[in-house]
Amino acid sequence: CDEKFISEVVDILRSRADQNIVFVQGGQYINRQGKLVLDNPDIPSDMLLIDGEKYFLNFHRFKHFSHLSTVFNRREAVAIDFYRLDIASSDIESFLRLALHGRVVLVKKPYGVWVHHTSNFSQNLTLKSARANHKCITSAYQYARDRGMDRVALYRWKVRQRMSLLRQQVSYFVKKYSRFY
């Protein structure tokens, strides 16, 4: 983990104290069988301050999510019942909902290493848990809808997110079971 991670995030938050930032999220390296792969948000500069609704609707464009390198407003997270779902992507669902309560900062810098191994919950999905994981989309969608976000934009978001998740899951199961063929 980058030794400067916390101090850099605190500096970001202090310098933008009037911006109602609900979380700051940096990049990471992913360790896949000993090979480090850079996983940074796809943003046009080193840092992006973005409205939470815009972050929510454009989540797919950042091609990144890293709970490992995220500092968030705990008080706000508790208030919205963070991690309320018992699914693999409960963190994504929680951060999507949290984003709707303020602004988000994305930083194009890796702050740690996420190790993929056979004990990761996300590496041991069953068909049942994969299907249940779609709640990360439907729950975040309903939450945003209940907050009055544009229904057409939300519907497009939901379709895009479901297709993306379905592609990931098909790829996962093809790799998982291809050894039997």
Image (cartoon, rainbow, N blue to C red):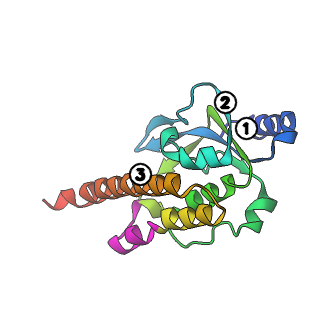
Distance from the alpha carbon under mark 1 to that under mark 3: 32 Å
Give the number of the disc on residue 5.
Answer: 1
Quadrant location, the N terminus: top right
Q: Say if 5 sits above or below 68 in the image.
A: above
- Residue 139, how many percent across, how many down? 54, 67
Residue 24, quarter of the rendered image: top right
- Callout 3: few (<14), some (14-19), or many (20+) C-alpha neighbours within 10 Å? some
Sequence-wise, which precedes: disc 2 or disc 3?
Answer: 2
Sequence-wise, which precedes: disc 2 or disc 1?
Answer: 1
Counting labels gives: 3
Visible in this render: residue 90? Answer: no
Circle 2/circle 3 CB separation < 8 Å: no
Give the number of the disc on residue 132.
Answer: none
Q: Amino acid at mark 1?
A: Phe
Tell me the element at label 3.
Answer: helix
Q: Which residue is mark 2?
A: 47
Sequence-wise, which precedes: disc 1 or disc 3?
Answer: 1
Give the number of the disc on residue 160.
Answer: 3
Residue 100 lies in magenta, yes or no?
no
- Callout 1: few (<14), some (14-19), or many (20+) C-alpha neighbours within 10 Å? some
- Residue 88, how many percent across, how many down? 49, 65
Residue bounds of the magenta highlight: 123-134
